[in-house]
Image: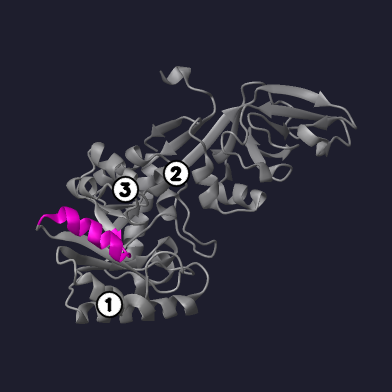
């Protein structure tokens, strides 16, 4: 079957993910690790990645959606699965039956869980908003929320969490959020709740802010090889090698153009390679005339507008390039490296978007290296 796959594929390096987990554990200094595998494990494949992390002894998993958690349960994942974005819809009974742990920040959701509890306690993690401004109970509303929660005796606050918005950049604001979180903890305990798990640290906080580690840390992007900030020096290994092959090589004469809109025109005789990969595969169109690929270990520029299925590359500096040559968007080749930060810089975005944008029509191939 593998021989029939497109030559365009994303090779997911499972040993690299295991290595990154070890680096995170060392930085977290013994705290439990809740591996965030939302968005198909940041484009790497939620089930194969979770299975490898479970085999490596990870303590639990964080997902954005209940559907992601149910997929993991169906695949045999038996660790804690925390649904970070809460529950939307009416599948509360199924979620509890599957042993997923919901994040709670809305009293109406507490009522929905109470309705299916039938006298059994339901463990939730309460999310407080200490400054992200998205989900979570705002600190100013926490007292009223906790009073309202008394109407639902089956709901048990097993965990308390928040989300840090500037762990990669602004330590002063991190300190403000942390102070708010500690105030929230005191208030929750005064209302009689006894959360046994506190957690706040994302990838950047794991490496930069040990004061935020508490009981669990929640690494996401760092498990896939990126520390969450360019200012963090951690020996992580990128876990995706995105490759294709040269489809055609041709010569362009001065004045001739490549691609839609004629955004690139040759000023001299040059050689162009066409690769069978474009924005339909997840190569961001904003990298047109800015990004690079690796061919024969040489960084070669993308020229012309990236199309849905095809992209043109200037290979004038590598005259021996031929049809079938491996072309890398991400990964190491001949001692040269391109990673998601390079492509993100060219596209004016962040590595998270580069990785999660690799589309489903790019086959994932899992290798132990």
Q: Is residue 337 above or below residue 244?
A: below
Residue 143 counted in the magenta span = no
Q: Residue at x 38, y 57 (%)?
A: 219
Left or right placement of residue 342 versus residue 122 in this view: right
Provide the residue designation for mark 1.
185
Residue 111 counted in the magenta span = yes
Image depth: mark 2 or mark 1 in front = 1
The dot on residue 66 is: 3
The residue stretch that appears in magenta = 103-118
Residue 219 appears in the rendering: yes
Circle 3 Cα neighbour tier, 10 Å, few/some/many (<14 / 14–19 / ≥20) = many
Q: Residue at x 85, y 35 (%)?
A: 266
Residue 59 appears in the rendering: no
Left or right placement of residue 138 versus residue 107 in this view: right
Q: Examine the image and state in which quarter residue 275 appears.
A: top right
Q: Examine the image and state in which quarter residue 185 appears.
A: bottom left
Circle 1 Cα neighbour tier, 10 Å, few/some/many (<14 / 14–19 / ≥20) = some
Whole-percent x and y of residue 352? 51, 51
SS class, disc 2? loop
Provide the residue designation for mark 2.
239
């Amino acid at each position: 079957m593998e021989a029939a796959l497109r030559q365009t594929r994303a090779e997911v390096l499972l040993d690299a993910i295991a290595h990154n987990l070890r680096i995170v554990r060392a930085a977290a200094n013994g705290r439990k690790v809740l591996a965030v595998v939302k968005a198909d494990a940041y484009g790497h494949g939620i089930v194969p990645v979770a299975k490898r992390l479970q085999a490596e002894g990870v303590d639990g998993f964080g997902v954005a959606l209940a559907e992601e958690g149910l997929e993991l349960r169906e695949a045999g994942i038996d660790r804690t699965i925390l649904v970070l974005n809460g529950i939307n819809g009416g599948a509360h009974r199924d979620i509890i039956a599957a042993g997923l742990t919901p994040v709670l920040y809305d009293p109406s959701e507490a009522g929905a869980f109470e309705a299916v509890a039938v006298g059994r306690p339901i463990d939730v993690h309460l999310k407080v908003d200490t400054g992200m401004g998205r989900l979570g109970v705002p600190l100013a509303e926490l007292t009223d929320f906790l009073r309202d929660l008394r109407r639902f005796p089956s709901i048990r606050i097993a965990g308390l969490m928040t989300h840090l918005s500037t762990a990669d950049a602004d330590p002063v604001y991190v300190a403000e959020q942390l102070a708010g979180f500690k105030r929230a903890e005191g208030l929750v305990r005064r209302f009689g709740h006894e959360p046994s798990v506190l957690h706040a640290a994302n990838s950047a906080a794991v490496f930069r802010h040990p004061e935020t580690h508490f009981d669990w840390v929640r690494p996401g992007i760092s498990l896939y090889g990126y520390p969450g900030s360019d200012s963090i020096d951690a020996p992580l290994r990128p876990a995706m090698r995105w490759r294709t092959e040269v489809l055609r090589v041709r010569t362009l004469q001065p004045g001739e153009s490549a691609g839609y809109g004629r955004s690139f025109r040759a000023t001299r005789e040059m050689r162009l390679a066409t690769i069978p990969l474009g924005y339909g595969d997840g190569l961001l169109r904003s990298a047109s005339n800015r990004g690079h690929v690796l061919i024969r270990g040489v960084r070669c520029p993308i020229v012309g507008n990236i199309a849905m299925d095809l992209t043109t590359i200037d290979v004038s500096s590598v005259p021996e390039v031929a049809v079938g040559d491996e072309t890398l968007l991400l990964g190491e080749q001949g001692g040269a490296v391109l990673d998601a930060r390079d492509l993100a810089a060219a596209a004016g975005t962040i590595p998270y978007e580069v990785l999660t944008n690799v589309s489903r029509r790019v086959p994932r191939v899992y290798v132990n290296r």
